[in-house]
Image (tube, rainbow, N blue to C red):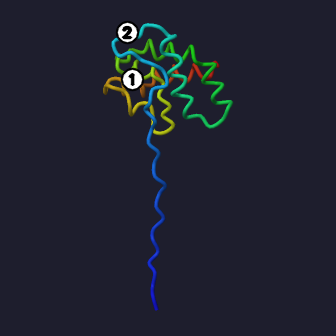
Amino acid sequence: MTIKLMQPASDPPASAPNLTAVYDSKPKEEITSVSQVQPGLVSMLSSFVKTPEQKAKIINAGPCLGNAGLRAGFSAGSLHFFVGGAPLNSGSVVEHLTTYKDKLLWTSPAFTGTMSSCLQSA
């Protein structure tokens, strides 16, 4: 008689975030306008949505979200990351910000409150 040991069910592999920029972000270019930040930030945030309604809300909130991202005080490196609009699809934006200060800023009550207000107003 042969006894087969049951293999534990393995968790599905975690998908790796897609860090490929959708939009061109020239590293030497200074980010100074909402129109530079908005498309990429909307693209990035839209990659996490589950419904067309959620995507429409992010698109409608785009100008406010872009303004919030630009005016918050993020480093040039993180602003360029926003401009690129990488379709992360998994993980979180904060994991890819370039400085510890930026990570704290992204998760701060002031910034998350502003982002939430943008979405609620859309």
Decide which of 105, 58 is in the foreground and name it.
58
Residue 76 horizontal/vertical position (percent): 35, 16
Q: Residue visible at 32% across and 23% down?
A: 101
Quadrant position of the C terminus in the picture: top right
The amino acid type found where label 1 is placed reads: Leu
Disc 1 target residue: 105
Q: In which quarter of the image is residue 2?
A: bottom left
Residue 19 horizontal/vertical position (percent): 43, 32
Q: Residue visible at 34% across and 17% down?
A: 75
Residue 25 horizontal/vertical position (percent): 42, 17
Q: Residue visible at 57% across and 19% down?
A: 118
Q: How far apart are marks 1 and 2 (CA)?
A: 20 Å
Task: Please identify the residue farthest to the left as the structure is shown.
Answer: 100
The disc at residue 30 is 2
Q: Residue visible at 39% across and 34% down?
A: 95
Which circle's residue, 1 or 2, is located before the other in the chain? 2
